[in-house]
Amino acid sequence: MQFNVVIIGGGTAGCVLASRLSEDPGQAVCLVEAGPDYGPYAGGGWPEDMVDGRQLAFSHSWETDREDRSQLRARILGGCSGHNACVVLEGAPADYDAWGPGWTYRELEPYLRRAERQLRTRRPTDDELLPWGSAFLQAGGDASIVNPLNAVGSVRWNAAFAYLDPARNRPNLAILADTLGDRVLLDGERAVGVATSAGELTADTVMLTASSYGSPAILLRSGIGRIRDCRSARGWPTTSESVRAGSQPSCSRTRPRASRASIPSSWARSRLRSGARPARRGSATSSCFPRSSRASRATR
């Protein structure tokens, strides 16, 4: 199959790119995701644990032998935004400014606000907080931090709902779910397509959005990277040596993003009150919603 753009990885970044790029009817866009696509939210086909923002969901996580759940990735359309703590955080303005012209906070702020609106970001109401959360809020006073949420009622409003649902009916957008992206197909040093578990896809442009773990692995299997790393990846010959491929992975520049639940908010708040510098990746509790209340579905 031939496309103008093939995007490998249907997580948060992949959903955004597929939605934005397919706004041009002249661009044939294909989004490839290893996990399932349960259709639009309004169809009611999504598993309950994946839409219930009151708790973390692990039913669609990639297999791992690690006990550290903070590193789990979601194998589902929407990626980690589909199973995390519904917290949307943007970086400190100084962090953006350090990236230089084109990436300063002043230049990016309109897009940050647009992303907030797209993700239905809101501040939780006081009656949605767990008792211990309310206690921290009262004890901290003006110094308390209440994380904004990408939640509609108690529904985890993931990137697939926010970005893909409005675009699903576009004839120039194809979504290939349950399809693994294996490696980039090259003609010399030019990417011309992708080898997937469903066959080869050819494209004018190939975009990798398979996370800080998946994207480097795809590059290495494609022969792009340090010679020794490419050989150990699967024995593929090195086509284009890049000492950066697979080294020093970091979060993308796309902000705000729905962060993984990794560090208790009480710990983060105490660190902030003590003058510690906030981490670039947002910290979150596993839930801000009272578990005893019934999950309210978003208006369909």
Image: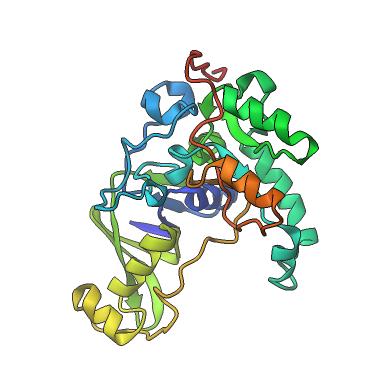
Q: Is residue 295 above or below residue 233?
A: above
Q: Is residue 92 above or below residue 285?
A: below
Q: Is residue 237 above or below residue 252?
A: below
Q: Position of residue 65 (x, y in %)?
A: 24, 52
Query: Which residue is at 52% across, 55% downward?
Result: 27
Q: Is residue 186 above or below residue 53?
A: below
Say whether residue 267 is left or right of residue 209.
right
Say whether residue 108 is left or right of residue 8.
right
Q: Position of residue 172 (x, y in %)?
A: 48, 46
Is any part of residue 152 visible from this angle?
no
Say whether residue 72 is left or right of residue 28.
left
Q: Position of residue 7 (x, y in %)?
A: 43, 57
Between 83 and 79, the one lying in front of the other is 83
Is any part of residue 134 visible from this angle?
yes
Between 168 and 57, the one lying in front of the other is 57
Query: Which residue is at 45% across, 79% downward?
Result: 244
Query: Which residue is at 39% across, 44% downward?
Result: 175
Say whether residue 66 is left or right of residue 292.
left
Q: Work out which residue is located at the far left of the displayed protein and give it.
A: 235
